[in-house]
Each structure stands twice: as structure tokens, then as C-alpha cells.
Image (cartoon, rainbow, N blue to C red):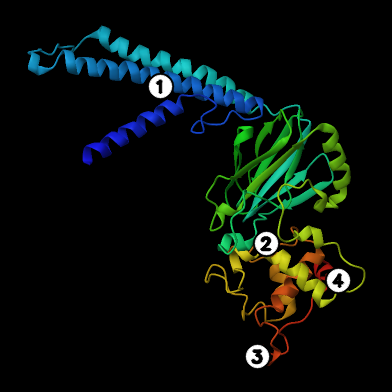
Amino acid sequence: MKVKSIAQRISAVVLFFLTATAGAESRYNMPVGVTSISREVYHLHMLIYWICVGIAVIVFGALIYAMIKFRKSKGAIPAQFHGSTLIEVIWTLIPFVILVAMAIPATIVMAQMYDDSKADINIKIVGFQWRWQYTYLDYDINFFSDLSTPQAQMDGTQPKGEWYLLEVNHPLVVPIHKKIRFLVTSNDVIHAWWVPAFGIKRDAIPGFIHEAWARIDKPGVYRGQCAELCGLHHAYMPIVVIALTENDFDQWAKQHNHNQNLDQAPTVTPSTKPSASETSAPPAGTMTQQQLMTLGETVYDSHCTVCHQPTGEGMPPAFPALKGGPIAIGPVSGHIDIVMHGKASTPMVAFKDQLSDTELASVITFERNSWGNNDTGKYGKQAGGLVQPADITAARQ
């Protein structure tokens, strides 16, 4: 049984080696991608790989040959090379030549990767805990992209979808055959914007702007993730990019100028519940409690549930409970203030620039009227209550 197990392991190693050398078709190899840079990176990877394979074949071949040919049992006497200038020059010169052979193509590819001049479109990407903000600097378009996987799938009460934890409510939309310049930074901690098909991975660091670019060859949906451990819900920061033809992108951009109608973005995956933006258009006049609660639940699921949990019980001390907590049952003004401006030195971020007045009003109303927080007999006159968009507008001023 032990011999069979060892044989199986050796077979697995050999199989992995063979499939890894099969080229672009192997699922064990890195993807070729859909940009010129991603293809250059792939070819560089394969060049370095085969150089390493050649070195391994020569070194291990010589080692195995010497072990067999000059083994002690055959009476071999080891040769002495101490003080040989020729040998020292050879084993210094050969690695130097190999390194230069690697460095020249690597430098050429790196220079191409960082040449973001003459861009057709500039997009600023800001990482938040835990979402992405996209601002089209050449258009009047600015929106947040949040995970849209239903909470029930994450809780295990529903079957996981095809794009589990890789679907968003608002994907980044870009044109093909245009040079797109990405300016990547962060609002809080270090993130990393990574789309393998583009050959792009840039760290998002607060106070710094890192640049990257891509020219996409063909339309499609391309996915990525945050590639830097950025906190508790690091796995909940997917990236979805939809590449459209130039005409389709121009039509999309016209529809979304002035930050309006983001719910008309190209559909990526169906959702069991409408996104916040799909229900965020403020109705005329004062909103009813039902309207506020319906929209508020959607906003809460999209932005708050990962920290404060669907039950509102949070994960103290990092994420305090909203159920019966001092914020949700305390003065309305304090609740509005912390949701809008966040709290320094804590994971609580400011949502004043992330959500509309209607969304802020609805989510605060939802938090104050859920999980029994509206029980005035238990918590007093300050419990419950409705917050209208006009209240948020006044708070901004």
C-alpha cells in the first residue's frame, strides 16, 4: 500500500509538470489575457520558465550523471578544483549571461507596462472597505461597485450561483480598442485592483496613486478581485469589467452622464433582489415608512450586513451591534452623523459621498425600525422614527 501511495504521488507530480508545460491551453498555466500587455507578460513568463527548465535539466542531469558514473562503489577518485581560476570565471560568467538574458526582455515588458501616456480614457479607482469606487475623469460618471451575491448564498441557505462572490451591482464599463488609464488609490487601508485577463495588478495605497493601462481586444465580461488582504471581508471585493464596442460604450456613457440611471448598466448576473440604485430614485414628496424600509433593507444588505450582520447583532467589539445598540435607539441626529461621517480609528467609514440622500435616509430608518429597535416601551421616546431625504439634505448643509 505504501509503495502504491508513493507511486501515485510521483505520477501526480509528473502529470502536473507535463500539464504545466502544455502552454496556454493548460488550466494550470497563467492566462494569456485580452490585452497586449497580458500577452507580453505571458510570453515573458514562458521564456523565463523554459530558461529555468533548461537550467534544471543541465544541472540535475550533470548531478545524476556524476552520481552514477563517478560513484564510490566503482572506485572513483574525486577531482580537485581548488584554486582553479578558469572554473571560477566560468561559474560566474554563465549565471551573469543567464541573468542578462532574463533582464533584457523583462525590462522591455516593464517599460511597456508603465507607459500610460496618450490615454484615451482616464478612470480613477478608489478602494474602500469593502467596495470599489469608479470615477470616469473624462465623463461626468461616478459610482460605487458592491458585491451583489445574495446574503442567503453566503449564509448557505441557498445554492451558490455560478459567479459566487464574483458578481457586482455596478460593473466597470469600458470600450475596446481604446487605451484606458487607471489611477488606483485607497480611501482607508491597502487594497489591490487585480484583473488577470488584463495583466493588471496595482496596489491601492492611501495617499498614493498608482497607474496602469489596458487596451482590450474584444468585448466580454472580465472578472477579478482585491488581491491584498484588506480586512475581515477582503473576499467580498470582486471586480467586474464589461468591455463594449466603441459605439455601445458611447451610448452607455451618454445614458450615465451626470451620475444618473446607473441601474441601466449592462446586466452581468441576475439578482434575487434589486440593487440599491434600482430603487433609490427619490419619490415625490415625503416617503412612506414602507418605501423607506424596502429601500433601506436593500441598502443595508449591500453596504452594512457584512459588518453588522443580517441580524443586526454585529461582531463586537470591532463591529458593534445595531440591535438594541446605542446608535440605533439613541438620538436620530447622532445616528445620521455617524452614518454620514463615520468614526475615526474604527472600521466605520463615512457614507456621505457613497450614498444618496434617499439611500441614507432609508437605511437609517431601516436600522431604527428593525430587530425591535422601534419598541418605545423598552427603549423610550427616541426609539424608532422615520428619517426623510430632506433630513439628510439639511444635515449635509
Q: CA distance from mark 2 to mark 3?
A: 28 Å
Q: Which residue is mark 2?
A: 303
CB atoms of marks 2 and 3 within 8 Å: no
Determine whether the residue tagged by mark 2 lies in a helix, strand or loop.
Answer: helix
In the image: residue 312, left or right of residue 83: right
Q: Which residue is mark 1?
A: 52
Q: Is residue 22 above or below residue 390?
A: above
Which residue is painted at 71% across and 81% down in the image?
331
Q: CA distance from mark 2 to mark 1?
A: 47 Å
Determine whether the residue tagged by mark 1 lies in a helix, strand or loop.
Answer: helix
Q: Viewer-nearest of labels 4 and 1?
A: 1
Q: Position of residue 291 (x, y in %)?
A: 82, 72
Return the mark for residue 378: 3
Q: Considering only order in the chain, which callout, 4 or 3, is on the residue closer to the N terminus?
A: 3
Rendered-image quadrant of the C terminus: bottom right
Kind of residue at disc 1: Cys
Question: Is residue 156 visible from the viewing direction of this image?
Answer: yes
Q: Position of residue 267 (x, y in %)?
A: 76, 47
Q: CA distance from mark 3 to mark 4?
A: 28 Å
Kind of residue at disc 2: His
Q: Considering only order in the chain, which callout, 1 or 4, is on the residue closer to the N terminus?
A: 1
Where, by quadrant of the figure, is residue 322 drawn?
Answer: bottom right
Q: Viewer-nearest of labels 4 and 2?
A: 2
Q: Considering only order in the chain, which callout, 1 or 3, is on the residue closer to the N terminus?
A: 1
Kind of residue at disc 4: Ala
